[in-house]
């Protein structure tokens, strides 16, 4: 079978690189496994895909932060470390674009398949996923590699640090399509489909969401 780019016109050129079994199941049956951020942080055995800060938007706080002593019981924050907030429950499928570095791609596996339409694939994932979980929302697109800004807030929801009973430090605009600009992730040219859910399967944050989409979403590709 000829293997060449079969993406739809006006769609981003996207791919998934994996091991042979995963490749065969996707091409033949449309099989996809979506994982939670918790899975990627702790249970993922593939070193290339493991990320200890997956699902958390944060920024280093090497820059000293000083607060109004009349309003805050914590007057300052200094030293090495990070401050951030965890994103709400979701399942993630990772893809990559043409900008992935060759050695990073090899770490993912020996087989690559392409995505004909990210729009259609994301809708197929949404349709199949809702048969198993209660969905709040979904997002898809290119990952931006940047730190997340901090903000002061009077709202205690999703707080990173409570500076007092009425002033809170939190991440501004948490986003599943954002990752910290650190290796090896900055070399992955990652794209994502994310499904936000009320709860994980069986309330298990490590559970994998296994679905089958239309195999016509994919095409075989060799590099």
Image (spheres, rainbow, N blue to C red):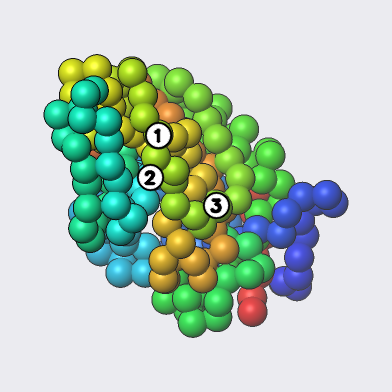
Whether residue 222 is visible to the viewer of this picture, yes or no, is: yes
User: Can you say whether 98 is above or below 152 in the image?
Assistant: below
State the quadrant of the C terminus: bottom right
Whether residue 86 is visible to the viewer of this picture, yes or no, is: no
Helix, strand or loop for disc 1 = strand
**Mark found first going from the N terminus, 1 or 2:** 2
The percent position of residue 113, horizontal first and vertical second, equals 60, 63
In the image, which disc is placed on residue 57? Answer: 2
Residue at the far left: name it: 73
Q: Between 49 and 201, which is closer to the camera in this rendering?
A: 49
Q: Between 110 and 198, which is closer to the camera in this rendering?
A: 198
Residue at the far right: name it: 9
User: Can you say whether 158 is above or below 187 in the image?
Assistant: above
Residue depicted at 44% across the width and 22% down the height: 135
User: Can you say whether 201 is above or below 177 in the image?
Assistant: above
Asked if residue 64 lies left or right of residue 79, the reply is right
- Mark closer to the observer (3, 2): 2
The percent position of residue 83, horizontal first and vertical second, equals 28, 46
Give the residue number, with chain letter if any, for mark 3: 143
Examine the image and state in which quarter residue 157 appears.
top left
The percent position of residue 48, horizontal first and vertical second, equals 37, 69
Asked if residue 150 lies left or right of residue 71, the reply is right
State the quadrant of the N terminus: bottom right
Give the residue number, with chain letter if any, for mark 1: 151
Q: Between 212 and 117, which is closer to the camera in this rendering?
A: 117
**Mark found first going from the N terminus, 3 or 2:** 2
């Amino acid at each position: 079978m000829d293997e060449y780019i079969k993406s739809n016109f006006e769609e981003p050129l996207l791919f998934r690189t994996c091991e042979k079994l995963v490749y065969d199941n996707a091409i033949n049956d449309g099989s996809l496994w979506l994982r939670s951020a918790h899975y990627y942080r702790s249970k993922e055995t593939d070193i290339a895909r493991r990320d200890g800060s997956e699902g958390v938007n944060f920024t280093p706080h090497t820059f000293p932060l000083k607060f109004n002593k009349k309003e805050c019981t914590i007057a300052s924050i200094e030293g090495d470390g990070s401050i951030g907030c965890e994103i709400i429950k979701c399942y993630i499928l990772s893809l990559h674009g043409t900008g992935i570095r060759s050695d990073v791609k090899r770490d993912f596996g020996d087989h690559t398949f392409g995505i004909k339409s990210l729009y259609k694939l994301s809708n197929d994932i949404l349709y199949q996923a809702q048969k198993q979980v209660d969905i709040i929302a979904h997002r898809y697109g290119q990952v931006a590699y940047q730190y997340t800004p901090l903000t002061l807030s009077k709202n205690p929801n999703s707080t990173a640090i409570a500076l007092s009973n009425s002033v809170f430090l939190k991440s501004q605009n948490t986003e599943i399509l954002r990752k910290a600009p650190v290796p090896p992730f900055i070399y992955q040219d990652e794209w994502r489909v994310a499904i936000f859910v009320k709860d994980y399967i069986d309330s298990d944050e490590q559970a994998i969401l296994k679905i089958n989409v239309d195999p016509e979403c994919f095409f075989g590709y060799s590099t």
